Amino acid sequence: MRRAQLSFGDGLITEEVSDLREDWMIQADQVLADEQIVSAVYEALAKRLPRVAAAAGRAPQPKWFM
């Protein structure tokens, strides 16, 4: 697999923010990388909040509101 070329700022930005990452963020990334956990959460939320889950975004506003 070929790696994409980095732009000038990519390395600089990575170096500057590397120490901002906390331990809990690494654990959260590992949990979010597990597709089974993420899909289970989506399914549970869809059962709990079917109207909101179906909309998948902000509820529409009435025309007069805009």
Image (tube, helix red, strand yellow):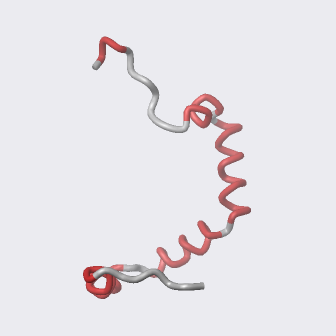
Image height of 36 relative to 44, above or below: below
Residue at the spot x=50%, y=84% of the render?
A: 3
Residue at image position (54%, 70%) is 28
Q: Where in the figure is residue 17, as x and y percent of width and height?
A: 30, 81
- Where 48 falls versus 25 (above or below)? above
Q: Is residue 20 left or right of residue 37?
A: left
Location of the C terminus by quadrant is top left
x, y percentage for residue 52? Answer: 57, 33
Residue situated in front as seen by the camera: 46 or 13? 13
Quadrant the N terminus occupies: bottom right
Place of residue 61 in the rendered image (x, y in percent of width and height, measured from the top left): 39, 21
- Residue 23 lies, with reference to residue 59, above or below; the image says below
**What residue is shown at x 69% (from left), y 64% (from top)?**
35
Q: Is residue 27 left or right of residue 23?
A: right
Total number of numbered discs in the rendering = 0
The residue depicted at 61 percent of the width and 28 percent of the height is 51
User: In the rendering, at what x and y percent does residue 65 appear?
Assistant: 30, 17
Q: Quadrant of residue 56?
A: top right
Which one is nearer the viewer's eye here, 23 or 1? Answer: 1
Q: Nearer the viewer, residue 33 or 22?
A: 33
Q: Residue furthest top?
A: 64
Q: Is residue 36 depicted above or below 8 in this figure?
A: above
